[in-house]
Image: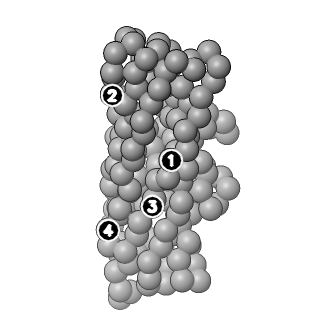
Amino acid sequence: MRPLTRILALLLLVLGADAAHAALKCKVAATSLDFGLYSPLAAGPLDTAGTVTAQCQGGLGIVRFQLSAGSSGDATNRLMQGPGSTLGYNIYLNSARTEIWGDGSAGTREALRQQTRRGRMEHEVTAYGRMPPGQDAAPGFYTDDIVVTVIF
């Protein structure tokens, strides 16, 4: 029986703006996806959730949330790096974990929110993480850095 492995995926922030919505200003925050302890002997996947929040004001328009592919370079097959091995996982936009959250390319989707008033609005997107069962990885601490880009 292999020891349990602690898993953590980090969400980092990058802010973006386009000229059409320059008056819209947003403050962004994100929580980490912490998978906790992973056992390769578990019968089902290991699920977790986190959030990305943008508080926007001063303009109208679409607020787009995109995620990078992480260390794997492929958002449809994300990998956490650990001591000499990797663990596969992914991040989804829906609780059924069928819509991969990425930048809108290669089978991924971006999250869209509508800023409908010039006053302060909070836009929250839930990040649903899943790690498949049965992965044979060395015990240790595994991480991946995911960049959240918010375009407004």
Residue bearing mark 3: 9
Mark 4 → mark 1, Cα distance in angstroms: 22 Å
Q: Where is residue 83 in the image (x, y as percent from the top left)?
A: 54, 83
Instruction: Report the amino acid beneath label 2.
Output: Glu
Rendered image: mark on residue 122: 2
Instruction: Report the amino acid beneath label 1.
Output: Leu
**Which residue is located at x 44 percent, y 23 percent?**
113
**From where the camera sits, is residue 103 visible?**
yes
> In screen coordinates, is 40 left or right of 20?
left
**Which residue is located at x 52 percent, y 18 percent?**
23
Mark 4 or 1, closer to the camera:
1
Mark 1 → mark 3, Cα distance in angstroms: 13 Å
Residue bearing mark 1: 13
Mark 2 → mark 1, Cα distance in angstroms: 16 Å
Q: Are marks 4 and 1 in contact (CB under 8 Å)?
A: no
Q: Do the residues labelled 2 and 3 touch (CB within 8 Å)?
A: no
Instruction: Report the amino acid beneath label 3.
Output: Ala
Front-most of residues 46 and 140: 140
Residue bearing mark 4: 36
- Element class at badge 2: strand
